[in-house]
Amino acid sequence: MGRSFENRKHAILKTAGQKSKVYSKYGKQLYVVAKNGVPDPEANPALKSLIEKAKRDQVPSHVIDKAIDKAKGAGGEDFSMSRYEGFGPGGCSVIVDCLTDNANRTITDVRNCFTKTGSKLGPQNSVAHLFDQLAVLSFKGDNEDEVLEAMLTAEVDVDDVECKNGQLTVFAATNDFYKAKQALLEAFPDIELEVQEITFLPQADANLTEEDVPIFEKFINMLNDCEDVQDIYHNAVLPS
């Protein structure tokens, strides 16, 4: 149906790095989701989904349990979501999502990443309109029509269903993420969701040159090293 997640997912660069960075990222996200809802995954679909994702990324149970236990206590840290947008090396579009308890520290850190790599931090909504924010669920399969029928039966607002190389991918409205996931699991109880997330997909790619690659990699590594950075989205395509 025209939208190739396999071809575009290279543009979704998630925060990686050392294990401690990954654990810290998930610990913070789990705490916020549990604190803002209820610290019970069976009563909090967002928390349950995040726990499943953390386990797929091999986050130890004690890290998950500690974050949820912390959310059960009174008081605690006050994290807020911050989103920064701009133009990276080679003119690519970049969105940086952060969770922070110190907005001044976060904007300073993120701005330094842009400034020190010749990139440009832009105002809010300067590049977000160049991306589609969608719920993405992907699993092994080949019957596109059955998947689409399951989505329509569940009244999911479907953007696209794609079948490529034995992989089925559903693109849906973000507010239908949990409805789409539940519909898939009920219609196809044996499937294993390899991708289940709300993410930004670029509407067009920015092809980098060989000369752009070193500074682009430096830019991404600097962002990944920032304490508060959670997710990085871009439309850069590196030369093969």
Image: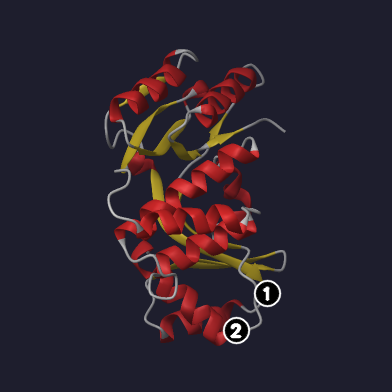
Which picture quadrant has residue 214? top right
In the picture, the quarter occupied by the C terminus is top right
Q: Quadrant of the N terminus?
A: bottom right
**Eye-nearest disc, 1 or 2:** 2
Q: Is residue 239 above or below residue 3?
A: above
Question: Quick one: label 2, few (<14), some, or many (20+) residues within 10 Å?
Answer: few
Is disc 1 in contact with disc 2, using a CB cutoff of under 8 Å?
yes
- Describe residue 194's horizontal placement relative to residue 80 as left or right: right
- Residue 57: percent from the left, percent from the top? 63, 53
Q: Up-down: is 161 above or below 154? A: above
Q: Which residue is mark 2?
A: 188
**In the rendered view, how is the structure colored?**
secondary structure
Q: Quadrant of residue 93?
A: top left
Q: Position of residue 106 (x, y in %)?
A: 36, 28
Residue 130 visible in the shown view: yes
Instruction: Report x, y in % for residue 160.
Output: 48, 66
Residue 48 located left or right of residue 22: left
What amino acid type is highlighted by mark number 2?
A: Phe
Q: Which residue is at a point 46% across and 13% down the rendered structure image?
A: 118
Q: Quadrant of residue 153?
A: bottom left
Vertical comparison of 163 with 145: above or below: above
SS for callout 2: loop
What residue did someone put label 1 on?
A: 141
- Is 130 left or right of 140, judged from the image as shown? left
- Mark 1 belongs to which amino acid? Gly
Callout 1: SS: loop
Quote the CA–CA distance across marks 1 and 2. Answer: 10 Å
The residue depicted at 63 percent of the width and 22 percent of the height is 213
Query: Which residue is rendered at x = 37% and y = 52% of the image?
Result: 32
